């Protein structure tokens, strides 16, 4: 196990995961939006043509701008369907994960507690979570673990875009702060380094005790 | 409250709901696939142009043929994205539900326990369940209840298509039988007739004690 | 099917269910706390000695006063363990449900979204929900349906005890009002009257779109 | 952070966690049943009198023998209520967790997919999961993370007791094997060592892709 692809790996959570994998000796391809734009299926197909297999795959991508249901156009649904769902399906269909490998999905806490202004994200990230859950049983036969991390409020550029007064918001959270990308990076890095394989088919909230739902 | 639209109302669960609403005095437009094909957005747009508002809307549609992930084409994802998700979004965006009305979604037990051979259905019906959950809070302001019914194995043509030996399968179920469409029809009819409104934003398994998950 | 027992049937939700069952022709034993106090196992044993079997059983009981974890004594845990859990287990173990019957549990929305000041209720109502889920598969063989209704904020004496300014609170809810006990009563009555049996092993939120969790 | 208590730390998952914490330099008190029997509240009280505070607390205990609902006595419910629920409550009420510390609960996959022959475990482990979820918000203020790990089939003495033909059973699992206690030990050790704090208030399935529920 030496090679990883981290989609959306140039900043935020993706970058932290990439850094963590580099630190434990991985060769990491960390894509930015200009290398691979999952909302553009041509870009996705070019990418998969150049990457046939990998040991660790991290499926991670930014979300759409905040938007309420009644203002979303058909084209927007289709674009983000590509970005958050179909692009990832094409990647999984075409890039082979090597035996003993890992697939990490960075989804969002909105998959369990859907958010009105993030309705596109809530719906499509959830849909892909179902796909990964199903595939975890297939991949298990090749000793590949599928781990869905559902971050809550993390200290990223995106959170700053979405939240007006981040400082005030952070103080309202149970831990009085946002999560740090590095915490997720370290988490992913540790699992890979320690070869923890039985953690699979799971959705892991990563939200500093912020969610209301028991599960 | 006198008018209902039941999509996919010509047979199976949809027909049973339609019958039940007729019985309690509703004027029901029960569409068949030739009246409204939700996989075809032109058909959807024609439909919404002719139906501006309604009291009770039942979102119900058949699913795709059984298919494993690695054999699904991009075109199939897109088609069923329309059929199970985007078509319904366009309908909700364009057909106004009258004050005090109801939206029923007939989804599937696969939204909670995803099924490998029904992966398309598992993913997109779940995505739309998230949309309806979010909208239930908006609709609540107009006293409109949003109820997601997630049927398990029901005695429909579709179940016969999907299951080889239905008789044997039925005997393996906790109740030793499939559910009857009429049970769901009666359930929907009773809620509407009794004007039970506080049941909203809910996913109701309807599976004869068959599911494994507590929630 | 003619006989029902409604525990905690003298007021609130229990009374509404009792009224609804009487209306459809049932002989209802609606117990008050002085007839049957589920926190007192002697009282429970007396009760089950006098009631060998029934068609419809409604398991319903008030909760403990609001209390934070660190102020709860061992004796209080034990008392409410009896009231919310063990008393119901003894009842189910000793009162036989007739073929084709129903068991309704009136739990609470706190089973999915636990509430700090209702921690006792959150824990023990949830524990019993697990018991009923398991038993739903056994009871299915005798065509008995087990239905767990998880009410959110309902217009009862209890809600008035727990919430300081009920009017203001009600306005903050998605439907701008509390739920009415009669809505739950009518819901239960309809299911029984229509002999809807395939609804079993299910937890049904009844909270006017108030919960955050998708499921 | 140097001191840990691992309840049930003399074998199985508890021992693996203890070993892992020792390896990263912790002083670990790993109790066996003769040091601390959580089913015996006197034993619990003695224990908490001798341990006022700690950095990392691991709540872990064996379950009761397999037993169906209708054969469980009142005394058994009470005993295991102590063992799986009340004993842990007394421990949390009396042992202070130091700032920046951790509470790990080792529960079970039966909390989400209840198991008929493990009904006691299903109910009470779930009840305590609700308690820990609630407390995670309190503990967050002191930067203490609460992590509930819900193991599926793990290679322990207990699994061998519960399953007749373990080898055959293992082959039926998605990964064709049981999980190893060391995987959970390493997981816990890594989180503590890397000081990953934002993982809190979470239930983490640890079951090798075996569960059916999406969440």
Image (cartoon, coloured by chain):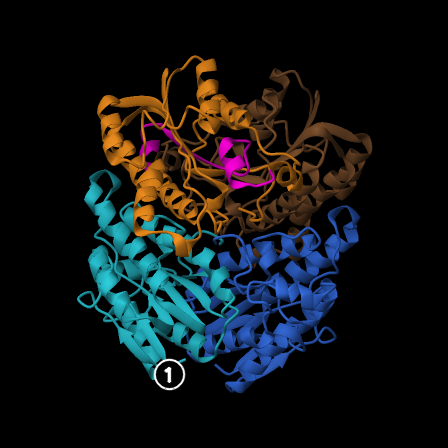
Chain colours: A brown, B blue, C cyan, D orange
The kind of secondary structure element at disc 1 is loop
Give the crowd class for mark 1: few <14, some 14-19, many >=20 residues within 10 Å.
few
In this view, the residue in front, B12 or A92, is B12
> Which residue is most to the top?
D25
Percent position of residue C158, x then y: 23, 61
Asked which quadrant contains residue A103, the reply is top right
Q: Nearer the viewer, residue A64 or D120?
A: D120
Q: Which residues are magenta?
A: D137-165
Position of C122 relative to A35 (above/below):
below
Q: Nearer the viewer, residue B213 or B35?
A: B213
* Image quadrant occupied by the N terminus of chain A: top right
Q: Residue at x 50, y 60 (%)?
A: C137
Residue A10 magenta = no
**Image coords of residue A170 (percent x, y):** 39, 34
**Residue that carries the numbered disc 1 in the rendered image:** C24
Number of numbered callouts drawn:
1
User: Residue at coordinates 45% horizontally, 23% vertically from top-left?
Assistant: D15
* Residue A30 relative to residue D85: left or right: right
Q: Is residue B26 visible?
A: yes
């Amino acid at each position: 196990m030496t090679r990883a692809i981290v989609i959306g790996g140039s900043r935020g959570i993706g970058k932290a995961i990439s850094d963590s994998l580099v630190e434990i000796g991985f060769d990491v391809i960390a894509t930015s939006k200009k290398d691979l734009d999952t909302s553009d299926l041509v870009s996705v197909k070019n990418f998969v043509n150049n990457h046939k297999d990998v040991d660790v795959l991290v499926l991670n991508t930014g979300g759409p701008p905040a938007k309420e249901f009644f203002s979303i156009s058909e084209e927007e649904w289709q674009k983000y369907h590509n970005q958050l769902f179909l692009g990832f399906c094409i990647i999984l269909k075409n890039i082979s994960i090597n035996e003993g490998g890992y697939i990490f999905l960075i989804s969002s806490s909105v998959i369990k507690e859907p958010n009105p202004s993030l309705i596109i994200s809530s719906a499509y990230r959830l849909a892909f979570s179902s796909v990964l859950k199903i595939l975890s049983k297939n991949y298990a036969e090749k000793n590949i673990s599928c781990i869905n991390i559902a971050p809550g409020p993390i200290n990223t550029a995106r959170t700053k875009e979405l939240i007006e007064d981040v400082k005030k918001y952070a103080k309202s959270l149970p831990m009085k702060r946002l999560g740090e990308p590095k915490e997720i990076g370290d988490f992913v890095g540790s699992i890979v380094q320690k070869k923890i394989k039985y953690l699979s088919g799971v959705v892991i909230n990563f939200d500093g005790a912020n969610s209301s739902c028991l599960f």
